[in-house]
Image (cartoon, helix red, strand yellow):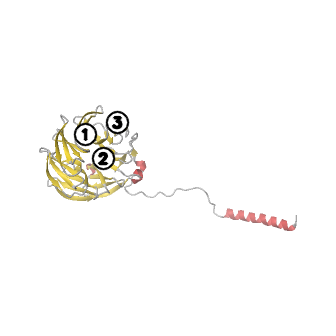
């Protein structure tokens, strides 16, 4: 080996040793991936882990209504597309039974006689809650929606959205006894504290029709109420709460004067109301935003908003909601996903 080659080899070895020494003298880099610091959630955020989804509901969409049978501890949830009414246990939070009903829409419990009334297609059906079977039915009009019982349970009032009227059924004979013309596209109904009058919201012409229970006729019409989609009687007071869908408002109507006395700004595209009177508040769900507004009754204002977007995305569709004081939770349905959630609230 020549002297020049020896020098090159020795130089290369020395260079390699210098590189190794330099590498070990520098801070070591590892391939460990550390999780980012958790960011603080919004004050009213409900995370997916806190939401308990009811199991075994297979409806692809269109959960049309929900009612609670306190005596039995069951929630009844209708699925228009599946042709079923699900019976869901409060304790089990699973489907305990199913009632086959063609295209079930809205429901109304009559616990005094252990029955449930269901609107379906152009009829109202009477369902026995002991055997979960349809016992009687009567035709009422085009696309019947919400129902209520008045006159000591003797009369059943049903709004027919595309007939622009309210059908009245005798609950003993289960026959149609009257049809009352109202405004354009009636969609919901509620009765006053004394049960003397029922109020019907007419979605298309921004009005509320007031009907006498004894005379079965419209006695007055309240105009300019936005786009009313829901009306609820305020428990224990002479007030009606109306959801204005396009104005994002809760409109408060005094039933003594039939005047609007307050307008409360609420969530986008409000869809349902649930009361928690023990804590002086009520909840309003947003159909488009997947959130729930909390309205303080004393302040007459929305004080916070539960953001459910994380759990309910990518599809909005909150449409039914009931507050249960025992479990301190809201039971919420999403009509676009066919899911039911138990949402804990403080």
Q: Could you say which disc has been placed on residue 323 in the image?
A: 2
Residue 244: where, in percent of width, then height? 26, 56
| Residue 213 in sight from this viewpoint | yes
Q: In this orientation, which residue lies closer to the viewer: 170 or 297?
A: 170
Q: Which sits earlier in the primary sequence, circle 2 or circle 3?
A: 3
Question: Spatial distance from mark 2 to mark 1, Cα to Cα?
Answer: 29 Å
Placement of 93 over or under 271, stated as above or below: above
Question: Spatial distance from mark 1 to mark 3, Cα to Cα?
Answer: 20 Å
Q: Which sits earlier in the primary sequence, circle 1 or circle 3?
A: 3
Residue at the farthest top position: 131
Residue 4: where, in percent of width, then height? 85, 68
**Count of numbered circles on the image:** 3
Tag 2–tag 3 contact (CB < 8 Å)? no
Residue sitting at x 36%, y 36%? 96
Residue sitting at x 19%, y 45%? 166
| Residue 192 in sight from this viewpoint | no
Crowding around mark 2 (Cα neighbors within 10 Å: few <14, some 14 to 19, many 20+) is many
User: Mark 1 sits on what residue?
Assistant: 123
Q: Could you say which disc has been placed on residue 232 in the image?
A: none
Residue sitting at x 52%, y 56%? 35
Secondary structure of the residue carrying numbered label 2:
strand
Secondary structure of the residue carrying numbered label 1:
strand
Q: Could you say which disc has been placed on residue 98 in the image?
A: 3
Tag 1–tag 3 contact (CB < 8 Å)? no
Q: In this orientation, which residue lies closer to the viewer: 122 or 260?
A: 122
Tag 2–tag 1 contact (CB < 8 Å)? no
Q: Nearer the viewer, mark 1 or mark 3?
A: 1
Q: Nearer the viewer, mark 2 or mark 3?
A: 3
Crowding around mark 3 (Cα neighbors within 10 Å: few <14, some 14 to 19, many 20+) is some
């Amino acid at each position: 080996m020549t002297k020049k080659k020896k020098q090159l080899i020795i130089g290369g070895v020395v260079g390699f040793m210098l590189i190794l020494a330099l590498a070990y003298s520098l801070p070591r880099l590892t391939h460990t991936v550390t999780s980012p610091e958790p960011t603080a959630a919004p004050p009213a955020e409900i995370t997916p882990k806190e939401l308990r989804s009811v199991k075994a509901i297979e409806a692809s969409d269109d959960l049309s209504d929900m009612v609670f049978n306190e005596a039995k501890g069951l929630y009844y949830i209708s699925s228009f597309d599946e042709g079923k009414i699900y019976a869901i246990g409060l304790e089990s939070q699973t489907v305990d039974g199913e009632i086959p009903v063609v295209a079930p829409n809205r429901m109304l419990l009559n616990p005094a006689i252990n029955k449930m009334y269901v609107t379906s297609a152009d009829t109202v059906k009477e369902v026995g809650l002991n055997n979960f079977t349809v016992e009687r039915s009567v035709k009422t009009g085009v696309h019947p929606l919400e129902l209520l019982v008045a006159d000591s349970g003797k009369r059943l009032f049903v709004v027919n959205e595309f007939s622009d009227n309210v059908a009245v059924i005798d609950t003993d004979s289960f026959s149609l006894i009257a049809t009352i013309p109202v405004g354009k596209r009636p969609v919901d109904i509620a009765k006053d504290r004394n049960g003397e009058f029922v109020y019907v919201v007419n979605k298309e012409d921004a009005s509320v029709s007031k009907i006498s229970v004894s005379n079965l006729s419209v006695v007055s019409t309240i105009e300019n109420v936005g786009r009313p989609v829901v009306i609820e009687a305020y428990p224990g007071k002479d007030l009606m709460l109306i959801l204005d869908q396009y104005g994002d408002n809760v409109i408060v109507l005094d039933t003594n004067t039939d005047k609007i006395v307050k307008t409360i700004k609420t969530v986008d595209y409000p869809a349902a109301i649930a009361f928690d009177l023990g804590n002086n508040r009520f909840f309003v769900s947003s159909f488009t935003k997947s959130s729930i507004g909390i309205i303080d009754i004393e302040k007459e204002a929305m004080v916070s908003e539960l953001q459910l977007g994380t759990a309910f995305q990518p599809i909005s569709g909150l449409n039914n909601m009931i507050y249960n004081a025992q479990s301190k939770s809201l039971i919420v349905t999403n009509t676009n996903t066919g899911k039911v959630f138990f949402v804990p609230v403080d």
